[in-house]
Image (cartoon, helix red, strand yellow):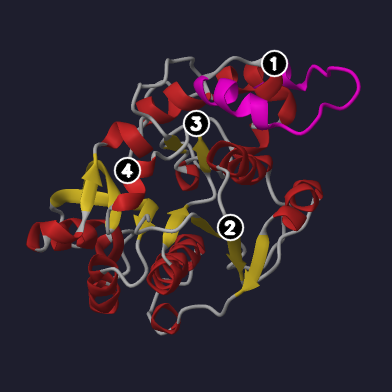
Amino acid sequence: MSRIPSHFHFIFGLRPQTEAFHLVYYLCLESCLRINKPGRVTLYYHFEPYGKYWDLIASRIELVQVPLCEEVAATHYDCDLIGNKLRYAHHADFIRLDKLIEYGGVYADIDTLFVRPLPDHLFEHAFVLGREDRIRNPASGEWSDSLCNALMLSEPGSVFARRWRERMPMELDGSWSNHSCQLAARLADGIPEAVTIEPPEVFYPFMWTPEGIRALLEENHPWPEKALSVHLWAHLWWDRKRRDFSAFYADLLTEDYIRNVDTTYNLAARPFLPPPASGIRASAIRAWRRLTTLRHPRLRHRR
């Protein structure tokens, strides 16, 4: 019997919903259902999503409303857009560990796409994380190892998950991931027997760099043989006003674009699209032309 149950957990809607549930999120859940055939899929929300893609998927998963995290709510953030985005991301950091400790299973960010079934051997471990590129801590200025929490497997009540959750409030310093991914790497050094670490190409075959995002969303590259899923790092390019990682943005990623432009992501996501509407519009071509016009020749990157 596996140590980790076939229960997949997702989080969305921790902030008030002012935009419809995006196609990317639908494709995450659809690919999970079809590729992994899980015994149970739960989406935790505070504000319920809406829109046509939500209507297509909501009845096929378990929906659970959750409160926000008290530790994050009590933390001071700068009252600007970046601070607000950090706060909601940090609520999700805490909630995901709470649910894995309580139920066990697989947690994945909702901008994940599953490309191959998670193999049985991963479910035999106590806790599983994937390595990502080293991250610079803005507070200390130091670069450190990072174990990304965008996809995790855990047995119920795992030692690693409980130790991580206990330390998180003390390490919550307002930076993106000191309390989450970087703390996980520090803990893994101290209790390596409690965690299994997969190489980057398993869960994160295209990294959170301008080159990785371009390879995924604009170019066509083969999938590494070991790749099971891909994380889109959507927070780095989703807003059309953000250009330091990519000129690509969420509004360009439409059904037409995925159906008609052969990119790394599009080819993998295409089988999970809902049935096509009648006729083929030219919006994909227009989006591609707009993207090539907007692309900045020298993109800086900051995580």
Residue 12 located within the stretch drawn in magenta: no
Residue that label 1 marks = 260
**What amino acid is labelled 4 in the image?**
His
Question: Circle 4 is placed at which residue position?
Answer: 121
State the separation of the CA atoms marked 2 and 3: 19 Å
Q: Is residue 242 above or below residue 174?
A: above
In the image, what residue occupies the spot 42% across and 15% down?
A: 222
What amino acid type should be assigned to the residue bearing mark 2? Arg
Give the residue at the far front of this rendering. 1
User: What whole-number distance in Å separates the C-alpha atoms at marks 1 and 2?
Assistant: 33 Å
Q: Nearer the viewer, residue 9 or 244?
A: 9
Mark 1 vs mark 3, foreground winner is 3
Q: CA distance from mark 2 to mark 4?
A: 19 Å
- The boundaries of the magenta stretch are 264-287
Give 257 or 37, whichever is nearer the viewer: 37
- Is disc 1 placed on a helix, strand or loop? helix
Which of disc 3 and disc 4 is earlier in sequence? 3
N-terminal label among 1 and 4? 4
Which label number is shown at residue 40? 2
Please identify, in this view, whether the residue under mark 2 or under mark 3 is nearer the observer. Answer: 2
